[in-house]
Image (cartoon, rainbow, N blue to C red):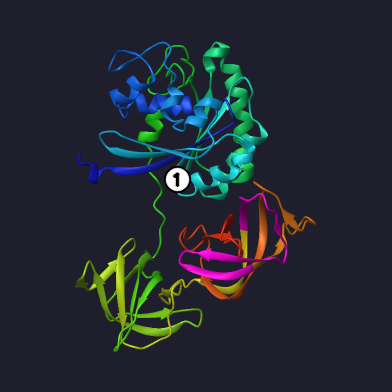
Amino acid sequence: MDMENKKLIRLFTAGNVDDGKSTLIGRLLFDSGAISTDILLGLSELKNSRTLHENFDLSYLTDGLRAEREQGITIDVAYKYFSTDTHKYIISDTPGHLEYTRNMFTGASLCDIAIILIDVNTGITEQTKRHSKIAALLQVSKVIVAVNKMDLIHYNQDVFDKISSEYLTFAAEIGLVDVSLIPLSALNGEQVTFVTGKMPWYHGGTLFEQISNFSPIEKVIESSSFRLQVQHVLPSNDSDFYLGEVVSGSVAVGQKIQVGVAGKFVTVDQIISNFNAIDQASAGMPITLKLKENCNVNRGSVFFSKVLPPSCSNKIKATLCWMSKNSGLVDQEYFLQLGSLKVKACIKKINEDQKINEIQLNEIVAVEIQTKEIIAFDSYLFSKELGSFILIDLSNNATLAAGTIQ
């Protein structure tokens, strides 16, 4: 199958420090043939091109930064790629340290599958729960819990069953739906890419099989729920041209659509794609719109259909992951950037059930945000593009937080 026709699946890994994330990804990369021989030779000796030297460290295949190797930790999101006969994969290897939770949030935001590692000797930790909550918050389709280092406890089923029972109970509490647990040894590759005879009591397939057999549930969005956020405006003597990507639904020449928070009705006169006039455009297509009417449309404005219109308000209920050492404060002014829209905003409430007025680094909290002007947006569940945003420092343009709209 051609690379262009292969299905793309995005994964991210998370877990505590020393749970074996990098080793697990290294195993997947090596066994899939994604690592070239010259890279392997640069790290260790090989007996042949498909066999690991006994002293070879699989984690070096993902811990690409020199500082990481020297310190023995993963300090940023590392993206790795591999493919099979039917799929292409992008893996985000996210940090395990508590202080890098913000990196994990970023790496997970567009992924289909979460692989959360648990050291079988340590069991479920607060960081395990934090990573799982982020997966639930970001609506990750499938969560695979890799209970690692089973070889160190002689493949004891009782220990695995206890961890499974505890995790599934917790997963139900936070709203995770598609969850599976796999006992494995990342170091040895057991139950990662091949079935080991040492765990005959487990019948759930290998990690690689579960990834390969994954079929995301297609989100059903009406074709009439058209969205396009304007990225650029080209002035014209006749009628301006509006450039953007179709976020959802479809649009056709002659169709009546609405624009801006006032919802003014306009008529599509032309649709241009790749310098060619077309009759219709659908989700994912970058296009240029020309309207029959003149209207005041700026960068960040949203065109939409009258069916399932976006919310329009200056108050947003959202969940924030704070990513700065500078605390987030109630009533302090920030820039809120949602796609191509950038407006001033402030946090009005933090966790309504708690009496706090600031947010610390790596905290994940429910907030109410007020923008200086009324804006159009969707819930994150409906649209990741119009349902997620960042907060920016007014003084230096530093990104302070990432958020999802409830």
Q: Is residue 216 above or below residue 31?
A: below
Residue at position x 31%, y 86% in the image: 239
Residue 228 in the image: above or below residue 404 = below
Would residue 137 appear left or right of 37 to someone viewing this image?
right
Quarter of the picture holding the N terminus: top left
Q: Is residue 144 above or below residue 252?
A: above
Q: Residue at x 47, y 21 (%)?
A: 186
Taking the spot 36% from the left edge, 88% from the top edge, the residue there is: 294
Q: Position of residue 124 (x, y in %)?
A: 64, 29
The quarter of the displayed image where residue 214 is located: top left
Q: Which residues are magenta?
A: 319-345
Task: State left or right for residue 351 relative to residue 293.
Answer: right
* Res. 245 image quadrant: bottom left
What residue type is disc 1 on? Cys
Q: x and y percent of residue 396 in the render?
A: 58, 61
Asked whether residue 354 is drawn in magenta, I would say no
Rendering coords of residue 102 (x, y %): 58, 46
Return the residue at label 1: 111
Judged left or right of residue 382, residue 83 is: left
**Is residue 106 depicted above or below 190 in this figure?**
below
Q: Given the current orientation, which residue lies at the most extreme right position? A: 355
